[in-house]
């Protein structure tokens, strides 16, 4: 069965820890619950000043900016991104997403199933 | 290396055949060329009256509507979608995307690597 839903109507999990992650909520749009066999679509919303951890892991990110402005920080420096930009973070690459604007910085981030849970 | 790019600046391939696909262009945002190991992010833009083929295949779609309005047609009927909606098409599920509005209907569609070329 084809599953359709409005992303913003899904419950948002606050994943902030006040240290490595700030002012950030996460929604799982398409994952094992919907029957996704291979990869998981998540949406992250970073409020003003929000950031994800600067970290690395063995799986890749394929991301797409939906709204707002941000910075993608990596081993080779910082890149500015805004709505309409795609971002590929290869496996084992250090990375961090930061909101650099006043509005919410929102992006999709797809990972292989091995990366979640 | 982290790869960042503006989706609309990528070359668009016209995949219309005038029969099963009409008024549709495709961009590959993140794929084997960028080193994507597992899944491929594509963006489709359907002009007024545009549609993708009504078909089925052994791989899934994880899609997200970026702009415009459309219909997702399947074995169980039609569902209206618009910007901010996610769509999961399981493997082997019949499906078709149609633009139902005046503006471009644009969506991301991620598939496992096995599904492309």
Image: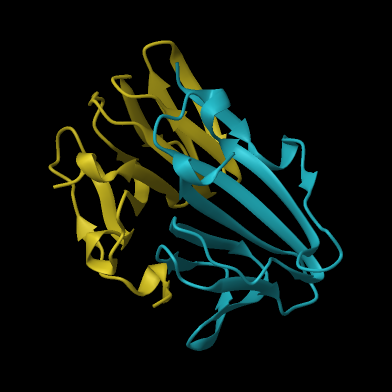
Chain colours: A yellow, B cyan
A35 left or right of A8?
left
Give the residue drawn at x 20%, y 59%.
A13
Q: In which quarter of the image is the C terminus of chain B?
A: top right
Residue A25 or residue B99, whichever sits in front? B99
Give the residue drawn at x 38%, y 18%.
A74
Query: Residue B29: percent from the left, percent from the top?
Result: 59, 38
Give the residue drawn at x 69%, y 66%.
B52
Place residue A26 in its image quadrant: bottom left
A50 left or right of B62?
left
B23 left or right of A87?
right
Place residue A18 in its image quadrant: top left
Residue B42 or residue A45, whichever sits in front? B42
Residue B95 versus residue B4 in the image, above or below: below
Task: Inspect this view and state whether residue B5 appears.
Answer: yes
Residue A48 versus residue A60 in the image, above or below: below
Query: Residue B57: percent from the left, percent from the top?
Result: 51, 60
Give the residue drawn at x 24%, y 32%.
A53
Query: Residue B24: percent from the left, percent from the top?
Result: 77, 59
Q: Which residue lies furthest to the right in this view?
A: B18
Q: Which residue lies furthest to the bottom in this view?
A: B77
Residue A91 or residue A22, whichever sits in front? A91
Query: Residue B94: percent from the left, percent from the top?
Result: 52, 73
Place residue A93 in its image quadrant: top left
Q: In which quarter of the image is the N terminus of chain B?
A: top left
């Amino acid at each position: 069965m084809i599953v359709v839903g409005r992303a913003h109507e899904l419950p948002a999990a606050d994943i902030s820890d006040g240290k490595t992650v700030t002012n950030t909520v996460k929604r799982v749009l398409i994952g094992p619950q919907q029957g996704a066999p291979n990869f998981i679509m998540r949406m992250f919303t970073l409020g003003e000043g929000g950031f994800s951890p600067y970290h690395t892991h063995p799986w890749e990110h394929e991301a797409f900016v939906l709204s707002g402005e941000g910075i993608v920080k990596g081993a080779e420096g910082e890149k500015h991104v805004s709505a309409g930009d795609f971002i590929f973070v290869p496996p084992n690459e250090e990375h961090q997403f930061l909101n650099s604007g006043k509005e919410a910085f929102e992006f999709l981030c797809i990972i292989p199933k091995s990366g979640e849970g």
